[in-house]
Amino acid sequence: MIICNLCKRDPVANEKNEAVKREPWGVLLAPPLQSGLPEKRLCWACALRVFEAWLDLVDGVAALPKPK
Protein backbone atom coordinates (compact mmCIF):
# COMPACT_ATOMS: atom_id res chain seq x y z
CA MET A 1 0.00 0.00 0.00
CA ILE A 2 1.30 3.43 -0.98
CA ILE A 3 -0.21 6.54 0.59
CA CYS A 4 -0.39 9.97 -1.08
CA ASN A 5 1.35 12.63 1.03
CA LEU A 6 -1.34 15.25 0.35
CA CYS A 7 -4.70 13.47 0.52
CA LYS A 8 -3.43 10.73 2.89
CA ARG A 9 -5.20 7.90 1.07
CA ASP A 10 -4.28 4.92 -1.06
CA PRO A 11 -5.54 5.80 -4.55
CA VAL A 12 -5.80 2.17 -5.71
CA ALA A 13 -7.29 0.69 -2.53
CA ASN A 14 -10.78 0.42 -4.04
CA GLU A 15 -9.66 -0.05 -7.63
CA LYS A 16 -11.14 -3.14 -9.31
CA ASN A 17 -8.89 -3.06 -12.37
CA GLU A 18 -5.78 -5.16 -11.62
CA ALA A 19 -3.78 -3.47 -14.42
CA VAL A 20 -4.20 -0.08 -12.72
CA LYS A 21 -2.94 -1.54 -9.45
CA ARG A 22 0.27 -2.79 -11.13
CA GLU A 23 1.11 0.40 -13.04
CA PRO A 24 2.41 3.68 -11.61
CA TRP A 25 -0.42 5.37 -9.76
CA GLY A 26 1.07 8.82 -9.32
CA VAL A 27 4.22 10.88 -9.02
CA LEU A 28 7.24 10.32 -6.82
CA LEU A 29 9.28 13.42 -5.99
CA ALA A 30 12.71 12.22 -4.97
CA PRO A 31 15.29 14.67 -3.58
CA PRO A 32 19.01 14.29 -4.30
CA LEU A 33 20.71 11.39 -2.55
CA GLN A 34 22.08 12.13 0.93
CA SER A 35 20.26 15.49 1.06
CA GLY A 36 18.29 14.46 4.13
CA LEU A 37 15.02 15.54 2.54
CA PRO A 38 12.12 13.08 2.46
CA GLU A 39 10.60 11.85 -0.77
CA LYS A 40 7.00 12.79 -1.53
CA ARG A 41 4.41 10.57 -3.20
CA LEU A 42 1.40 12.11 -4.90
CA CYS A 43 -1.60 10.40 -6.47
CA TRP A 44 -2.52 11.68 -9.96
CA ALA A 45 -5.31 13.92 -8.65
CA CYS A 46 -3.00 15.62 -6.12
CA ALA A 47 -0.13 15.81 -8.64
CA LEU A 48 -2.40 17.68 -11.05
CA ARG A 49 -3.53 20.04 -8.25
CA VAL A 50 0.13 20.79 -7.38
CA PHE A 51 1.00 21.36 -11.05
CA GLU A 52 -1.93 23.76 -11.48
CA ALA A 53 -0.81 25.63 -8.34
CA TRP A 54 2.71 25.93 -9.81
CA LEU A 55 1.27 27.32 -13.05
CA ASP A 56 -0.83 29.84 -11.11
CA LEU A 57 2.29 30.88 -9.19
CA VAL A 58 4.26 31.35 -12.43
CA ASP A 59 1.41 33.43 -13.89
CA GLY A 60 1.50 35.62 -10.77
CA VAL A 61 5.26 36.09 -10.99
CA ALA A 62 5.10 36.85 -14.71
CA ALA A 63 2.55 39.63 -14.00
CA LEU A 64 4.93 41.44 -11.61
CA PRO A 65 6.77 44.48 -13.00
CA LYS A 66 10.27 43.69 -14.21
CA PRO A 67 13.12 45.29 -12.18
CA LYS A 68 15.11 47.99 -13.94
Image (tube, grey):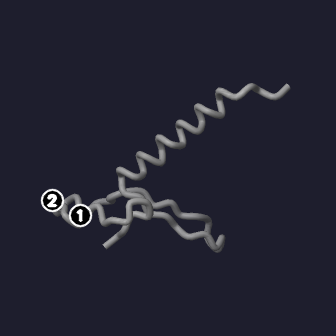
Along the line of sight, the residue nearer the viewer: 52 or 24: 52
- The amino acid marked with disc number 2 is Asn
Numbered tag placed on residue 17 in the rendering: 2
At 41% from the left edge and 46% from the top edge, which residue is drawn? 48
x, y percent for residue 62? 65, 29
Which residue was labeled with disc 1?
A: 21
Q: Hey, which quadrant is residue 22 in on the image?
A: bottom left
Q: How many marks?
A: 2
Crowding at mark 1 (Cα within 10 Å: few <14, some 14-19, many 20+): some
Please name the residue shown 62% across and 65% down the image: 32
Placement of the C terminus among the 4 image quadrants:
top right
Q: Residue at x 29, y 61 (%)?
A: 11
* Percent of width and height locating residue 61: 65, 34
Q: Secondary structure at mark 2?
A: loop
Residue 40 numbered mark, or none: none
In the rendered structure, the answer to whether residue 33 lies left or right of residue 7 reads: right
Question: Where 33 falls versus 68 (above or below)?
Answer: below
Q: CA distance from mark 1 to mark 2?
A: 7 Å
Is 15 placed above or below 58 here? Answer: below
Query: Is the Cβ of the residue at disc 1 closer than 8 Å to that at disc 2?
Result: yes
Of residues 25 and 22, the one nearer the viewer is: 25
Residue 55: horizontal and vertical position, in percent?
53, 37
Element carrying mark 1: helix
